[in-house]
């Protein structure tokens, strides 16, 4: 069984890397051209001062794009997975606090955001999705060596040591 994992791990890692990277890239890409909506989405959580929320609304989309592209390419996989996982963890906290406080907002994860009608929120699905993405990030942190990765030679030795 262990030998089978050694063979499959780089392929599993590829799927995990492309999934996490693809989600982050898409999320950033869909928001980067609409800074007003991105800022509104961050403000809707009512967690930060308006000026900080607006700045975060501007910074977050390009950061998501960069993390996503680097994961897709397999460059700095372990570091980008850690940053992506941390980002998803923060999103879980933000969504959970909005839910707990009774806010009726769209998460703004893939564009849009802001107030929605009561009963139109999807907090549980969004939290479960982001928990899944945190687990994918954790997998890549543990096993960063994947197929078709720009940094696979750098991680080959550490991946073999981790499996052994």
Image (cartoon, rainbow, N blue to C red):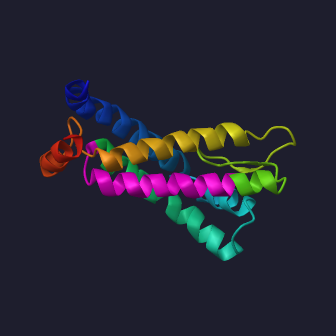
Position in image of residue 133 (x %, y %): 49, 42
Q: Which residues are magenta?
A: 73-95
- At 69% from the left and 49% from the top, the residue drawn is 113
- At 73% from the left and 39% from the top, the residue drawn is 122
Quadrant for residue 66, please give it: bottom left
Relative side of 123 to 8, left or right: right
Residue 66 appears in the figure: no
- At 42% from the left and 51% from the top, the residue drawn is 65
Is 109 or 7 nearer to us in this picture?
7
- At 64% from the left and 61% from the top, the residue drawn is 39
Is 151 or 52 nearer to us in this picture?
151
**Magenta part, dominant SS:** helix
Is 39 or 20 nearer to us in this picture?
20
Position in image of residue 102 (x %, y %): 85, 53
Position in image of residue 10 (x %, y %): 24, 34
Is 125 or 65 nearer to us in this picture?
125
Is 40 included in the stretch rendered in magenta?
Answer: no
Is 89 included in the stretch rendered in magenta?
Answer: yes
């Amino acid at each position: 069984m262990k030998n089978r994992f050694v063979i499959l791990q780089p392929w599993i890692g590829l799927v995990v890397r492309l999934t996490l990277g693809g989600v982050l890239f898409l999320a950033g890409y869909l928001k980067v051209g609409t800074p007003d909506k991105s800022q509104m989405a961050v403000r809707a959580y009512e967690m930060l001062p308006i000026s900080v929320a607006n700045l975060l609304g501007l910074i977050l989309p390009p950061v998501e794009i960069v993390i996503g592209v680097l994961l897709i390419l397999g460059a700095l996989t372990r570091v980008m997975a850690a940053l992506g996982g941390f980002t998803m963890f923060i999103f879980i906290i933000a969504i959970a606090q909005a839910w707990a406080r009774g806010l009726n907002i769209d998460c703004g994860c893939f564009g849009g955001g802001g107030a929605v009608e009561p009963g139109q929120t999807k907090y549980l699905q969004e939290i479960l999705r982001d928990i899944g993405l945190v687990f994918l990030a954790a997998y890549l942190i543990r096993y960063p060596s994947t197929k078709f990765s720009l940094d696979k030679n750098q991680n080959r030795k550490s991946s073999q040591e981790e499996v052994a």
